[in-house]
Image (cartoon, helix red, strand yellow):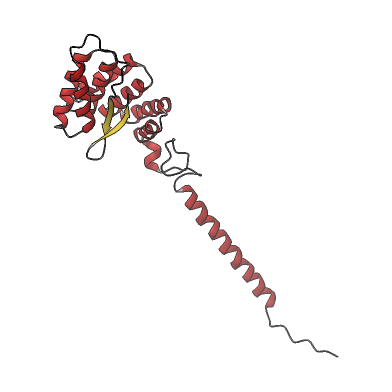
Amino acid sequence: MIQRPALPKHTGLRAALGRVGMLTVVASAMVLAGCQTNSTGFGRAPDSPYAPGTYGTLEDSVDGLIVGHRLTAAGEHELALKAYKRAAVEHGFTVDVLSALGSANLQLGRLGQAEKLLRRATQVDVNFAPAWNNLGVVLMETGQVSEAVRAFEIAFGLDRGQSAEIRENLRLALANQGNPDYDPANNDTFSLVRRGSGDYLLLSEI
């Protein structure tokens, strides 16, 4: 008769514990994967121009200006305008918000609304160069060349001539000052700017 070797005691208990350990490792891996996914939102790239989802970072989810600037850079001006309106609710009508709203309306061809908002921005903060520059762009678009020159001159003075975009805008405006046949639809390219980290950043060109 073949005699089978004796099994160690508590073999069933050890097997059960082994299975529990394996399940614990698998569950931990799933939790870690979920944390990595949710750090920037479900499937949302960190540099996505679109508004973050429920699982986005706190900074992105509360700052409509950041979202609006990303949408503007992506050419989504209607969506950017909605984001800037949300920023107005979040932050109030600050000079940054008013300037952004005015610039978005300008990009959408709503010149009257853009001019109104940018004039208001220059009243909220008379020392905010981007608002004066962007107002100058609107005035050029509506054929108010002399007043546009003045707006660009103010922006240039406040910026101390550091912004290449503001300098070029002033040069183009001066070149067309006194020209009764000036056509806003000509090939002149005027640049919008906004406040950036330590400098003014180019928003877009008109």
Q: Is residue 93 left or right of residue 6?
A: left
- Residue drawn 38% across and 35% down? 70
- Residue drawn 22% across and 8% down? 180
In the rendered image, the residue lying farthest to the right is: 1
Q: On the image, which quarter does residue 190 sit in?
A: top left
- Residue drawn 50% across and 56% down? 32
* Quadrant that contains the C terminus: top left
Residue 85 appears at what percent x and percent y?
37, 25
Above or below for 43 versus 20:
above
Q: Report whether residue 124 is seen.
A: no
Above or below for 96 versus 55:
above
Above or below for 91 versus 145:
below
Residue 90 appears at what percent x and percent y?
35, 31
Above or below for 24 versus 182:
below
Residue 166 appears at what percent x and percent y?
21, 28
Residue 63 appears at what percent x and percent y?
36, 36
Question: In the depicted view, which residue is nearer to us: 109 or 188?
Answer: 188
* Quadrant that contains the N terminus: bottom right
Q: On the image, which quarter does residue 137 sit in?
A: top left
Q: Is residue 159 left or right of residue 66?
A: left
- Residue drawn 68% across and 81% down? 9
Question: In the depicted view, which residue is nearer to us: 138 or 29?
Answer: 138
